[in-house]
Image: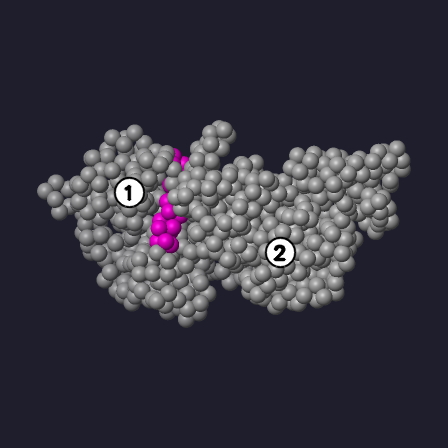
Amino acid sequence: MNTNELLSQLKKFVLIKSGLRNIDPAHCKTISELIFKETKNYVSETTVKRFFGFAQTLHKFSLFTLNSLSQYVGFSDWEAFCKEKENEVPDVDDVWQGLKIRTQAITDISLIAKKNSSGVPFNATAKRNFLYSDFDYFLKNDYQFTTISAQPGQGKSILIAHLVEHFFYNENAPYKSDIVLLINSGTIIDIIQNGLSLKDWFLKEFKFSGISELIAYFLKHPKQCKGRIVIIIDGIDQYLSVDKYFKIFIDLLHSIQHSNFIKVVIGLRVNNWVNLQPAITGSAFLNNAWYKGLFFDEDKNTSVPALNQEEVLYTLSKIEGKSITENDLHHGLLTQFKTPFWLQIYYKLKQEVKTLELNNQLLCLELINYFLENKIFLSKNSTEKIFILKEISRVITQGAVGHRVAKEDILTHISAYPEAYQELLFGGILIEEKRLTTAIPTEIVKFLNDDIYTYFLFLQLTEKFQFKPCKGFFEEILSKYAEEHAIREHLLNWSIRFCINRNEIQALKDIFKLPFTNEEKNKSFNFICDVALFELGKTDSKFNAHTIDINFIDIMVSGRIMSKHYKSVIKQLSEKVFDENIQIILNVISCSISIVDMDKAGLAESMQVLKRYNKELLELFPINPYDLILFFNNILVGKPNNSKTLLEKIDAFCQIICKSKPLPNRLLNSYEMIAYRLSIIVLFSNKNYKECADLCEAIIKKYPNIFYLRSSVFPSFLLVAIAQNNLKLNKLKTAQRVINLLGKLINNPNSYYTPYILASYILAKANFSNYTGNYKNVLIEVNNGMEVAAHHKLQIFEMSFQLIKIDALKHINDSESVSQAIKDLLNYLSVNKLTLPDFVNLNDEKFNHSFKILKSYKSN
């Protein structure tokens, strides 16, 4: 076997070992973790993606990577794997069989890459069997090549993958004995990177110096020709724009002239097909050898028709995991999804935006917006592209026919930004076509479809506001002003004002999903609160007590719970909002704030309101939050708690969670997060550490991807709780791993954490050092934590840090410092008129006696 064949075999073994039939990018992280677990060798997620063709491979795989993968599938190293696989393949005297083995290795890799590049999981894509009989006719008759031409995003490459599987690879494939060679762009890239000519590569892989020599051999030895050789070429459009590659391609077509056993299938974009047509029609052989197919559209130069309704509903049903009918779909979406790439965009959007339903027309616009954000706003030369697209849309609005423009009308802009223009063409945003029906053949330029054109009309309408309240706008701010932080902050503030003024709250969530700095996110959160308060005071605002909905509440629950901005907006909203359910959750949030602030009066006031809504609380929350809040109220006012009854309720709640099937993060709502947060704190504060661990485990089981949720502080809170709880259970190694994970999450640019979470993280590190006897490090962490807690007025953390400091100083026998630390703590309690509730003491049980003395001393 050659290297490609061996790599193909290794891919299959890795998939089998991982329990996967097919693979998508989401699996690569899992495979990376499985490899580490099995071999203790770390092969990164990115490397796994390159190995399976998700990312471009710019160099050969390292020996370490190959050894690790080989060990994962049961071999001592890569060399051992190669030796065994070589021994499995005997020397093949049969030229046909040898050629079949060699082509299969390349086709396997190409097929996997093609499946991996699908925007929708391959098994969810429609098989489009309308073309099967047509393709079968081509194979059985004298035609020597056919073209599958389509505009970008029409599903051409996925269609080809289905054809290969159906005719050559499936268990019941009709032409398993034929040789099929599938060549993708990846194959061409490998040839170029290795510095080979096509002839050199062909000789190296197939032992023939070219197609002509191969044909000559089988013409000379006809008995060794045991079927057809089907060469399928796809994904090479970018090379056909280069003259030398175009000539090689035409020479390839001419080289098959004297054979009846070689078939060539060419996947092309329409613009390249238009360029290829003259070469075909100008050659008698090529013109006669070309099979147009029943579905070739002469006007559009495409052979891939739009999806039909049945195919659309099939794919959506696979994506949704349930049967989708026409009635489940907005009619505009049904039309839009007939172009396959909109299904791909929908699949990607679905992973990020969880609130849009298929029966909602808004999804039509969001799909277009998402597509353009990724294709234009996040790409290289975005400014030039936007300028070109805006100019094209401007020319169209001036009276162009059929939503297209003559290329000569925008030639100035093309000449000014040639690279950006070519990227727009290759990315499928713009299409060039030749009109041959006019007196003089002309080139025209148009948008891929009218939906995109409409989007840029909308952009023109909103230019007077300078900003558009959508994800793409925030992404543009992020990339364009990366080094100009002051400008970026002003732009964020203006956009927040614009969104809230129009009551487009949903768009604000993108600030926290995108990798703005944590400081920017926290400032944005405060500014959202400020603008919201201002708008609430206006008489004609669209953001008012009648219109406030769960979108705004989601932001409030997911963000900072300890800032004056936050407290003010929650207080005013809870007093003004009309929606009863929103009012209830706002009062629950108010209680949470008072608990953290140890504000007895504020807590009593909010609880008094909640008493009126016992029935509604049970309906809204998975566990009655009033019972949980009452637990903390009793601690603060010094009343005994009926812990047994409350623990039984929490246990029942935990059991319900355990029975739930795994759910995506999008189903984790604000009511749940509040209930989880309060329940965890109750269990931890009541020293029910095992029960607390069980609840955390149940939450993670229910939401297995919870730690990928970057737009909320809840995952960080959960990690903090798990870390502290493991310390209490004396599971120090686990606690350390969780603390390290939390550190990585905080350092991840996509994460959103607040000063509250940062203080919690430092507190966990200090507590871990205290548990493991690293008392000098405790003092370092305490000083850092005290600075954060004092700056943000996090009183509960200041007390906890001071208690840990006292404990650490006692362990190093620094009596003078212990005495001073105790004085500082008591003075702090006196100045702030606070007591020491049990839940601020995070030290081990050996410190409990000292804590009781401190608590008793203060109460006197």
- What residue is rendered at 34% in x and 64% in y? 311
Pointer 1: what residue? 457
Q: Is residue 369 magenta?
A: yes
Instruction: Give how far across and how far down residue 570 sits, in percent.
Output: 55, 47
Q: Earlier in the sequence, mark 2 or mark 1?
A: 1
831 with respect to 39 (left or right): right
Q: Please tell me in which quadrant of the rendered image residue 224 appears.
A: bottom left
Q: Residue 550: say if magenta.
A: no
Chain part drawn in magenta: 362-382
Kindly report the secondary structure that dominates the magenta region of the rendered protein: helix
> Residue 792's spot in the image, x, y percent?
64, 37
Name which quarter of the figure residue 389 lies in: top left
Q: Position of residue 436 (x, y in %)?
A: 15, 46
Is 608 positioned to the left or the right of 447 in the image? right
Judged left or right of residue 299, residue 463 is right
Residue sitting nearer the eye, 812 or 522? 522
Q: Is residue 450 visible?
A: yes
User: Callout 2: helix, strand or loop?
Assistant: helix
Residue 1 shown left or right of residue 406 in the figure: right
How crowded is the residue under tag 2: few (<14 C-alpha within 10 Å), some, or many (20+)?
A: few
Q: Residue at x 44, y 47 (%)?
A: 544
Q: Which mark is residue 608?
A: 2
Q: Residues within 10 Å of mark 1 (few under 14, many from 20)?
A: some
